[in-house]
Image (cartoon, helix red, strand yellow):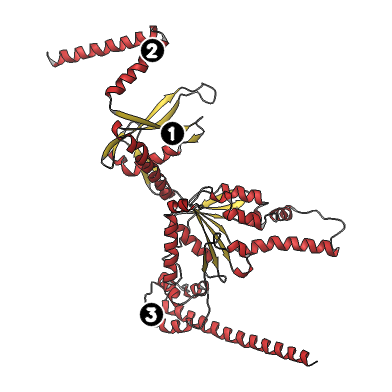
């Protein structure tokens, strides 16, 4: 038989099959069609050794995108999509790179513990109700996983868990991180672009490494926290004088872990219910920050105290004046209580989401309620104090790329006596001219350190005189 006759016969057979199928669908009862289709699939499954799992893009009434579909999409884009001959390109993080994924109706292979399997992307049209606003057929996308049935337990269990976990991790690494702030009980955000890192942070190397190790341990401790029965969160209390780098430390922590930041303004929260709602709306892999926590709590307490004192002394005005919106909002924010804040930190609702850091900053740690900063709430207390020589060397390298300078020994001696914050040191090191000569900046720092030492000595003399005068006054009173 010649090739031409073979193709002619094949065409006739295919045409006959199409005709028979059309006649079958047209004239045979639907019950018979369903019956034959059902048992034909069973017969095919008996001889066909492969299992297929389909993951649709949308679930339910197509209101939400499937998290499983998104995780698979991320996983395939990074591991197997380069096998595909047709790819889709989308802009990635910061719109500065392209993310490639396989196009519709493409298939790629994957391997897990020596087992070969296949992923295929597809889409199918679903005719929606034709209305003025939706006149066209709808399209739904899906991924289809195919594997041999003898590996069912391995694929459905460990492999799919691996795909979902890795896909979510890729999403976190590729996402555009955000800095949130709250307006009442709602979050708004901007892109987080703070450049601070632990490499550029002015701090003693040993203390810096201790913090890095603690953060790394926390980020990999999901199973540990689950085993001991604790929510996967950790509290950090940053305290020290103004200008010691507390906010910069938070930015470095966020950049190191790849977390979002939620900067919570307590004075903008009306009550404990709104505070709880804000917590629920935060995502995992985030840092919840309350800066100057002592000011927020004192602000609430002072308002109530002043109001009570006015009532007792009768100093309130007989005719109340109209309050503007700002004052009303302030009064509403004062309803947040210490109890509500404690529940926010480690109550039942704090376990929602997981993998969170809660960071408080304060200039005066002694003002805080002990219950607020005890272990279990604020697990790690980090004191950010005045700049020392090791921290200065980090700043000198950042600002002037200096590993050593002939003025370093003198500066080291001055740091033994002087108290100067990293912010003040950085201001002296900031180039004052286009040339940005390092020697001039270091000389300026030396002058600043010498001045700080003189001021400290003068202050000590004044304090000594005050103590001496106080002792004399006490002695006189005793003589009387």
Let me know if residue 232 appears in the view.
yes
Tell me residue 292's x, y (percent). Answer: 60, 64
| Residue ranking furthest to the front | 228
Q: Between marks 3 and 1, how big is the CA–CA gap?
A: 61 Å
| Residue ranking furthest to the top | 27
Q: Are marks 2 and 1 in contact (CB under 8 Å)?
A: no
Residue at x-position 47% and y-position 56%: 193
Quadrant in the picture for the C terminus: bottom right
Tell me residue 5's x, y (percent). Answer: 16, 12
Q: Are marks 3 and 1 in contact (CB under 8 Å)?
A: no
Tell me residue 45's x, y (percent). Answer: 31, 23
**Secondary structure under the numbered disc 2 in the rendered image:** helix
Q: Which image quarter: residue 207?
A: bottom left
Q: Residues within 10 Å of mark 3 (few under 14, many from 20)?
A: few
Sequence-first tag of 3 and 1: 1
Q: Are marks 3 and 2 in contact (CB under 8 Å)?
A: no
Sequence-first tag of 2 and 1: 2
Using the image, determine if residue 287 lies above or below residue 48.
below
Q: Of 470 and 403, which appears nearest the observer?
A: 470
Quadrant in the picture for the N terminus: top left
The residue under label 2 is 33
Can you tell which mark lies on residue 57?
Answer: 1
The residue under label 3 is 405
Sequence-first tag of 3 and 2: 2
């Amino acid at each position: 038989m010649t090739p031409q006759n073979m193709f002619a016969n094949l065409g006739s057979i295919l045409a006959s099959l199409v005709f028979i199928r059309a006649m079958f669908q047209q004239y045979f009862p639907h019950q018979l069609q369903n019956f034959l289709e059902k048992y034909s699939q069973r017969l095919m499954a008996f001889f066909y050794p492969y299992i297929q799992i389909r993951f649709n893009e949308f679930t339910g009434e197509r209101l939400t995108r499937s998290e499983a579909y998104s995780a698979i999409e991320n996983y395939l884009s990074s591991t197997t999509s380069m096998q595909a001959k047709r790819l889709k390109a989308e802009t990635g993080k910061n719109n500065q790179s392209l993310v490639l994924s396989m196009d519709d109706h493409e298939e790629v292979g994957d391997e897990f513990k020596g087992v070969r399997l296949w992923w295929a992307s597809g889409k199918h049209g679903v005719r929606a109700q034709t209305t003025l606003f939706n006149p066209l057929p709808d399209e739904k996308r899906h991924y289809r996983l195919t594997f041999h049935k003898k590996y069912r337990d391995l694929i459905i269990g460990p492999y799919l868990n691996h795909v979902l976990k890795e896909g979510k991790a890729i999403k976190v690494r590729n996402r555009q991180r955000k800095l949130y702030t709250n307006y009442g009980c709602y979050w708004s955000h901007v892109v987080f672009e703070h450049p601070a890192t632990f490499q550029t942070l002015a701090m003693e190397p040993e203390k810096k490494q201790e913090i890095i190790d603690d953060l790394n341990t926390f980020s990999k401790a999901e199973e540990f926290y689950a085993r001991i029965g604790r929510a996967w969160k950790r509290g950090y209390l940053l305290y020290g004088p103004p200008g010691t780098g507390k906010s910069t430390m938070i930015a470095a922590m966020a950049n190191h872990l790849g977390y979002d930041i939620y900067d919570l303004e307590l004075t903008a929260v009306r009550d404990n219910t709104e505070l709880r709602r804000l917590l629920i709306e935060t995502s995992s892999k985030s840092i919840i920050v309350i800066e100057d926590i002592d000011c927020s709590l004192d602000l609430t307490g002072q308002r109530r105290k002043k109001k009570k004192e006015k009532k007792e002394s009768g100093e309130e005005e007989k005719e109340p004046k109209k309050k503007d919106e700002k004052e009303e909002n302030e009064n509403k924010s004062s309803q947040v209580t210490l109890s509500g804040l404690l529940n926010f930190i480690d109550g039942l609702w704090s376990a929602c989401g997981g993998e969170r850091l809660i960071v408080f900053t304060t200039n005066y740690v002694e003002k805080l309620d002990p219950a607020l900063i005890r272990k279990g709430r604020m697990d790690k207390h980090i004191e950010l104090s005045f700049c020392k020589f090791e921290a200065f060397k980090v700043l000198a390298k950042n600002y002037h790329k200096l590993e050593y300078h002939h003025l370093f020994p003198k500066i080291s001696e001055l740091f033994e006596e002087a108290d100067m914050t990293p912010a003040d040191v950085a201001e002296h090191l900031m180039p004052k001219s286009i040339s940005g000569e390092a020697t001039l900046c270091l000389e300026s720092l030396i002058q600043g350190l010498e001045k700080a030492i003189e001021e400290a000595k003068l202050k000590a003399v004044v304090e000594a005189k005050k103590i001496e005068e106080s002792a004399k006054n006490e002695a006189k009173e005793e003589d009387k």
